[in-house]
Structures are given as C-alpha cells and as structure tokens.
Image (cartoon, grey):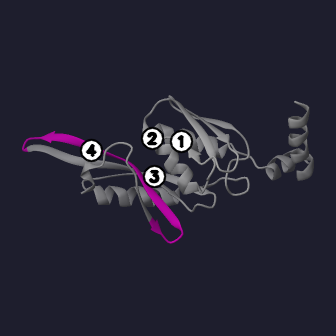
Amino acid sequence: MQRNMQRGEQSDRTEGELIDKLVHINRVAKVVKGGRRFGFAALVVVGDQKGRVGYGKGKAREVPEAIRKATESAKRNLIRVPLREGRTLHHDVTGRHGAGRVVLRAAPPGTGIIAGGPMRAVFESLGVSDVVTKSIGSQNPYNMIKATLDALQRIESPRMVASKRGKKVSEVVGRRSEEKVDG
C-alpha cells in the first residue's frame, strides 16, 4: 500500500476547496520483547491554491491514521500569503529554520515552479505558478517546509508597505519601476 512510499514521493487529494499533498512518510521501529513495533510519521501540506497554505505532522501505528492526523493539523495551521497577480511572489525573500535555508525569487510568467521536493508541494498548494527557489543547507523535509513557510510569512504586498509608511500604493509601486529604469 502506501508503506512503500519513499522520500520525495508525493500524493494529493482534494477535500472541499483545500488540497492536501503528502510530502514524507517516516517509518520508525521500537524493539520490544516479541520483536519490532512499527510506527509511522507523516508530513502533509494543505492549501487552497488561492494564497493560503499550511503544514502538519501526524504520528500513528498505521499510515492512513498518521496522514489523517497530519492533514487535520495542517488545516488548523493555515497562513495567508499575498501573491502578485495570483501567480508569483511580490519580491525575493529568504527563510530559515534550523540548518535549512531557502531562497525564493519572483519569476516572470511562463517560468513554472522551479523548486525541489517539499518546496514544490508548498507552492502547488499555495497556487503559485511562477517561482524560482533554491534550498541551501539541510535537506530534511521538515526543515525545508518550515524554512519555506518562514520565508512566505516575510512577504509583504505593496499595500502592506504603503500602509506602514503612510503612503499611497502608487507611490510605493512607482518607486520600484523607477529604480529599474535608473539602475
């Protein structure tokens, strides 16, 4: 069944408007008097493909139960991410968690999702269609997803920046296009 799922394989299901992607399953063994007792840990990413995403972990003696627990946990931990034109990020950003670091870059239309393993699941669930990413350091899927979500939480839309500075959105966005012409 799903017991043979190796690192990096993904499966996805839809429930209502949320889609969930299974990123990783870990099998652990506890040695007892009669032999080994196996347990499973699942890592799941959930998103609505419209700017909300979350992740969850679940542990159980059976794989489906671990996945169910992880999915419920992910649904409780959704975050909203502002997207430019509903397809890419507003600006380049770096995130980190533990030894894992990720660099996320906005991309022009038609680029696609250039991301490896766990990060790809996050962006597919988020609804981003154009992004370039690089994972630096830890390849642990838990750390990569946490670092990716850390980076996504740092993204600010021009509206958020304008409200912080007490300016109009057109002034903030106008400056960005002027810098590209001058620089």
Task: Give the image location of residue 59, x and y in percent.
Answer: 33, 51
Q: CA distance from mark 2 to mark 3?
A: 10 Å
Mark 4 or 1, closer to the camera? 1
Q: Which residue is mark 2?
A: 142
Image quadrant in which you'd find residue 91: top right
Quarter placement of the C terminus: top right
Q: Is residue 52 left or right of residue 76?
A: right
- Vertical placement of 141 versus 127: above or below? above
Mark seen at residue 27? 4
Q: Which residue is mark 3?
A: 56
Disc on the earlier residue, 4 or 1: 4
Please identify the residue farthest to the bottom as the structure is shown.
16
Please say if the residues under marks 3 and 4 sit with CB atoms less than 8 Å apart: no
Disc on the earlier residue, 3 or 1: 3
Q: CA distance from mark 3 to mark 4?
A: 17 Å
Disc on the earlier residue, 2 or 3: 3
The residue positioned 47% from the left and 30% from the top of the image is 138
Task: Give the image location of residue 80, x and y in percent.
Answer: 64, 56
Query: SS of the residue at dot 1?
Result: loop
- Nearer to us in this view, 165 or 23: 23
Q: Is residue 28 magenta?
A: yes
Mark seen at residue 154? none
Q: Which residue is mark 1?
A: 115
Q: Is residue 78 visible?
A: no
Q: CA distance from mark 4 to mark 1?
A: 26 Å
Task: Give the image location of residue 166, x and y in percent.
Answer: 91, 48
Q: Which stretch is magenta? A: 14-34
Amino acid carrying label 1: it is Ala
